[in-house]
Image (tube, rainbow, N blue to C red):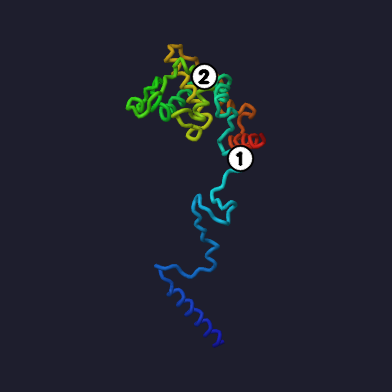
């Protein structure tokens, strides 16, 4: 009994000594620290543990990021001409879509193209960038498909806006750009459509109304990976 008591006292004293030796300024002893401390690989670094010693890996072939829909027109003069002739805005022409297009246009486009689409944005006025034509320039004869194609890929000094905007937003901007062209041409304002169709239904005509948008994105990605 005395032996057990002495052992208990010894264990308590030993535990107290171990605790008292722990300092706040230095870490305590660690058992297998590699189990919970990550290896600090540098981004884009070269390490033999990775295939080709490349830390940053490329996406799997055929993969499509969430919210990114495949665009079938290539970034070539032929693809641009094809889009200009055949690609049309799938969204219903509603006041809401036009107003949202105007707001997005003010954020992304007006600084160069101007609030009226006349190519006299603030950067042009300050001569930071030159040669921005008006939307009604006779040599351009822009169409809905042409405008979308240029927003998607960019052209000349204009970069792509496929990252800053999604498909729905680009088509909304597209409507507003075409409305500015009509105003510059002195054409009558286009009447709004009366429809119960949502933008999701217009962009995904094969999907029934009410289906979860996540399922829509996944279905689109699966379809793209099979093409």
Closer-to-camera residue (139/214)? 139
Horizontally, is 192 left or right of 184 in the view? right
Tell me where residue 204 sits by quadrant. top right
**Residue 215 badge:** none
Report helix, strand or loop for mark 2: loop
**For marks 2 and 1 on the same chain, the one whose residue lies earlier in the sequence:** 1
The answer to whether the residues at label 2 and label 1 have Cβ atoms under 8 Å apart is no
What residue do we see at 36% from left, 26% from top? 124
Where in the figure is residue 108, as x and y percent of width and height? 43, 30
Closer-to-camera residue (51/199)? 51
Tell me where residue 63 sits by quadrant. top right
Q: Is residue 143 above or below residue 58?
A: above
Where in the figure is residue 60, as x and y percent of width and height? 61, 43
Report helix, strand or loop for mark 1: loop
**Residue 63 badge:** 1
Where in the figure is residue 123, as x and y percent of width and height? 36, 28
Where in the figure is residue 14, as x and y percent of width and height? 48, 79
Cα–Cα span, label 2 and label 1? 31 Å
Q: Is residue 182 above or below residue 19?
A: above
Q: Is residue 56 above or below residue 81?
A: below
Binning the other alpha carbons within 10 Å of mark 2 as few (below 14), some (14 to 19) or many (20 upward) gives: many
What residue do we see at 39% from left, 22% from top? 119
Question: How many numbered tags mark residues here?
Answer: 2
Closer-to-camera residue (117/131)? 131
Horizontally, is 185 left or right of 54 in the view? left
Closer-to-camera residue (34/158)? 158
Binning the other alpha carbons within 10 Å of mark 1 as few (below 14), some (14 to 19) or many (20 upward) gives: few
**Residue 143 badge:** 2
What residue do we see at 58% from left, 54% from top? 50
Quarter of the C terminus within the rendering: top right
């Amino acid at each position: 009994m005395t032996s057990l008591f002495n052992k208990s006292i010894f264990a308590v004293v030993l535990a107290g000594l171990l605790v008292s030796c722990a300092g706040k300024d230095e870490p305590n002893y660690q058992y297998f620290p590699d189990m919970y401390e990550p290896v600090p690989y540098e981004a884009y670094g070269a390490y033999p543990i990775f295939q080709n010693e490349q830390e940053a890996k490329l996406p799997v072939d055929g993969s499509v990021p969430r919210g990114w829909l495949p665009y079938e027109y290539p970034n070539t003069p032929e693809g641009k001409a094809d889009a200009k002739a055949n690609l049309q805005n799938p969204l219903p022409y509603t006041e809401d879509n036009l107003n949202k297009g105007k707001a997005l246009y003010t954020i992304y486009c007006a600084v160069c193209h101007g609030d009226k689409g006349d190519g006299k944005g603030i950067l042009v006025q300050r001569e930071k960038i030159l040669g921005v034509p008006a939307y009604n320039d006779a040599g351009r004869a822009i169409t809905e498909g042409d405008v979308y194609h240029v927003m998607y890929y960019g052209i000349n000094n204009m970069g792509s806006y496929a990252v800053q905007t999604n498909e729905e937003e680009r088509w909304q901007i597209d409507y507003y750009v075409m409305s500015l062209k009509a105003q510059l041409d002195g054409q009558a304002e286009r009447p709004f459509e009366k429809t119960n169709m949502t933008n999701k239904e217009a962009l995904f005509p094969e999907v029934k109304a009410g289906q979860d948008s996540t399922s829509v994105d996944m279905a689109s990605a699966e379809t793209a990976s099979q093409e």
